Image (tube, grey):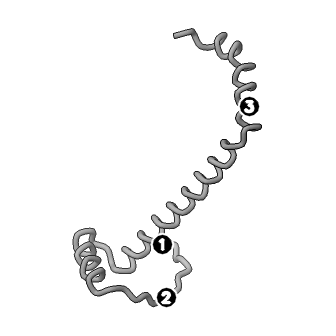
Amino acid sequence: MVMMMNTEKVTVSLPKVDLIRIAEYEKELKLSRSGIFKEAVELWLEAVRTIKMEKQYKKVYADKKIATEDKKMAENLLPVALEIWPKY
């Protein structure tokens, strides 16, 4: 059973040279133009999500208070970790 996706048509204007290059990939990847654009948008959306998460991580870890708390927690847990894992 094929699940139908909710789709909507869009109109995009691109330079001809880009469309020529896309047409080459259509043949190589055996994808329709829509398929190529769908994959490109999915990759872009994932990249934007990743960049956004990385910025949030950097903001949190740049916070000196959190860094200090993390260091204290690691120091407190070290004896427990050494009981479980041998020293190397």
Viewed as shown, does residue 17 lie left or right of 60? left
| Whole-number angstrom distance, CA of label 1 to CA of label 2 | 20 Å
Which of disc 1 and disc 3 is earlier in sequence? Answer: 1
Left or right, residue 60 beside residue 47: right
State the image coordinates of residue 9 (x, y, percent, origin top left).
Answer: 49, 88
Q: Residue at x 67, y 43 (%)?
A: 62
Viewer-side residue, 3 vs 75: 75
Q: Residue 22 location in percent, x, y?
A: 29, 77
Specify whether 68 is left or right of 43. right
Q: Image height check: is 84 above or below 31?
A: above
Front-lying residue, 23 or 30: 23
Mark 1 or mark 2: name the one nearer the start of the chain. 1
The picture places residue 16, in percent across and down from the top left corner, at 28, 87
Answer whether labels 3 and 1 touch (C-beta < 8 Å). no
Q: Residue at x 48, y 88 (%)?
A: 10
Which secondary structure, mark 1?
loop
Q: Which label sits in the foreground, 1 or 2? A: 2
> In 3D space, how far apart are the residues under numbered discs 3 and 1 (Cα atoms)?
52 Å
Q: Residue 49 sits in which quadrant?
A: bottom right
Q: Can you say whether 52 is above or below 20 in the image?
A: above
* Residue position for label 1: 2
Image marks 1 and 2: residues in contact by CB distance under 8 Å = no
Question: In the image, what residue type sits under mark 3?
Answer: Thr
Task: Find disc 2 in the rendering and name its residue.
Answer: 9
Q: Which amino acid, by three-letter code, is at mark 2?
A: Lys
Element class at badge 2: loop
Q: Which residue is mark 3?
A: 68
- The residue at 36%/85% (across/down) is 14
Which mark is nearer the camera, 3 or 2? 3
Secondary structure at numbered mark 3: helix
Q: Which amino acid, by three-letter code, is at mark 1? A: Val
**Does label 3 or label 2 sit earlier along the sequence?**
2
